[in-house]
Each structure stands twice: as structure tokens, then as C-alpha cells.
Amino acid sequence: METIIVKNEPPFLRITLNRPDRLNAINKKMIEEIRTVLEETVKDEKVRVIIFTGNGRAFSAGADISQFKELEGLTAWQFAMKGRELMDYIENYPKPTIAMINGYALGGGLELALACDIRIASDEAQLGLPEITLGIYPGFGGTQRLLKLVGKSRTLEMIMLGERISAKDAERIGLVNRVVPSNDLEKETLNLASKLAERPPLAIQLSKLIVNQGMNSPITVGLNMESLGWGVIFTTKDSKEGVNAFLEKRKPNFKGE
Ligand SMILES: CC(C)(COP(=O)(O)OP(=O)(O)OC[C@H]1O[C@@H](n2cnc3c(N)ncnc32)[C@H](O)[C@@H]1OP(=O)(O)O)[C@@H](O)C(=O)NCCC(=O)NCCSC(=O)CCO
């Protein structure tokens, strides 16, 4: 891989964006490489949690602006679709995803973090959607995912002003799940990931699917999916294991079956 470092350390797969001299700016190659790794890992049962982070002082400073010179109407649309398809793929990935935000998460970098299930940020991180300062606006799903996460007026403020906000402010408005001292970022992320890895993978997958569907549907659709999904989840061995373990006063051992 040219643009990312992949560490497969079951139960975790860590994808580190690795263009530190460009603050991990996301180019076409990086989009393709992330997609390839995720596709290869989807059936790897040993991997239970995906962690994204960045090498150096940024998570990612966004799409690679040096590639923008080549963009015109059609190619701009195609590039936006390429980025957006990756973010959609991450959002709907059947395993839990964590963005471990170690520094700048800007533009497409923040949009990648927004596609993850959980965002944990260093207290030194800065987040923002500065596209407006380039005369454009977010194109990798940020207009919609930020809206769903923090509401209309905060989204418009971030998009229209293009200013960076601190990790603490991001936590206050619900943009990140938690903020930790930068020295503890890795430890805290792995603690969180370990807990997720112990949970039943099929119940995680199904609940993620239902929550994601519920974000984009009338509440009755989400509620129907939730109750219908019970008919599926109760067929799994993990559901029997979880109930038995509780009744037998022991720790469950979920196998994703
Ligand atoms: C992140 C900033 C504020 C950091 O500033 P600073 O610490 O001063 O570091 P720089 O010298 O600016 O950056 C180091 C090096 O990285 C290059 N770089 C940074 N960001 C990008 C990028 N997005 N694309 C390409 N290259 C980038 C920068 O040019 C430097 O290279 P040198 O060769 O050493 O000069 C600051 O870097 C910044 O504001 N970056 C841009 C943030 C941005 O506008 N992001 C949105 C991009 S559009 C997008 O994401 C569309 C999808 O919705």
C-alpha cells in the first residue's frame, strides 16, 4: 500500500492514513486502497473492529487539493462520487468502526470520521469543514452526515464559516463521542475497541443496520425493522450464549454465530 499502513492485529484492523508530509490528504489512490483493505477484511471473522487514524500531526486535512486543478464538471462529480462511495461503504460496513482523531480532521478527513460509528479525539485535535475557503463546499457526504449528527444550524455554521473547532467544542455539540489527553488516545481507543470486540458481532451488525436505516426513514420503518430483526437475532447461537451466560452467572463468549 502506498498511502495507508494496515495493521491486522485481531480483533482489530488498524488503517493509518499515511501521507504525513501532506497531512494525510486523501487522494484517489488512498480512497482505492482503503476500499480494497475493507473489502478484503469483511469476511475475516477474526477482525471485529476497524480503527482509522492518521500518521503524524493530522488525522487528515481533507481531500488532496493539489488534485483539484485537474477537476472540471464531470471529473469533479466523479471524484466526489468516489469519495462519497467510500464513506457510504464505511458507514454501512458490517463491523464497528472507530475514528481515532489524533490531530487535524478537516474537510474529507472529517467526512471520513463522520462515516465511522464512533469518534474519539485527542484534546489537541481540531475539526472543521474548510471547503468554503476554497470556494467550494463538502463533497464526501459531510453536508448530510454532519446535519444528522449535530443539526441544521451548527452544520450550516461549520460549512458556511469554514472555521476549525476544538475537540472539546466538538464533544460539546455531539460531533465526537469523547475527548482524551493526546497521550492517552491510543490506550483509550483500544479500551473502547476491546469492549466492542467482546460484544456479539451479529447483534452489532444488525443494530448498526437498523440504526442507519432509521436515520433515513420514517420512525415506523425503523421500529418495524427493529422488531422484525428480533426474529433474526433470536436465531443466533450468540443470543442463546448471552442469555445462558447471564442465567449461569458467567461471562459470555460470543463467536459471531
Ligand atoms: C491543516 C492546515 C491548517 C495545517 O496548516 P500548517 O500547520 O501550516 O501546515 P501546512 O504547511 O499548511 O501543511 C503541510 C503540508 O501539507 C499540505 N496540505 C495540507 N492540507 C492539504 C490538502 N488538503 N491537500 C493537499 N495538501 C495539503 C500543505 O500544502 C503542506 O505542503 P508543503 O508542500 O509543505 O507546502 C492547512 O494545511 C490547511 O488548511 N490545509 C487545507 C485544509 C482544507 O482546506 N481541507 C479541505 C480540502 S477540500 C475537501 O476535503 C473536499 C471534500 O469535501
Image: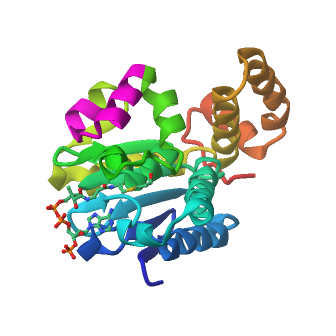
Q: Is residue 74 above or below residue 175?
A: below
Horizontal and vertical percent position of residue 255: 67, 54
Magenta segment, prevailing SS (helix, strand or loop) = helix
Does 138 lie within the magenta span?
no
Horizontal and vertical percent position of residue 213: 70, 33
Between residue 236 and residue 226, name the one nearer to us: 226
Left or right, residue 234 beside residue 43? right
**Who's the residue at 75% across and 25% down the image?**
226
**Who's the residue at 65% across and 73% down the image?**
40
Between residue 90 and residue 229, name the one nearer to us: 90
Furthest-top residue in this view: 220
Q: Is residue 176 at least partly visible in the picture?
A: no
Horizontal and vertical percent position of residue 158: 33, 34
**Who's the residue at 62% across and 69% down the image?**
41
Does 158 lie within the magenta span?
yes
Of the four image quadrants, the one with ligand 1 is bottom left
**Who's the residue at 59% across and 43% down the image?**
252
Q: Is residue 59 at least partly visible in the picture?
A: yes
Between residue 93 and residue 103, name the one nearer to us: 103
Residue segment shown in magenta: 153-170
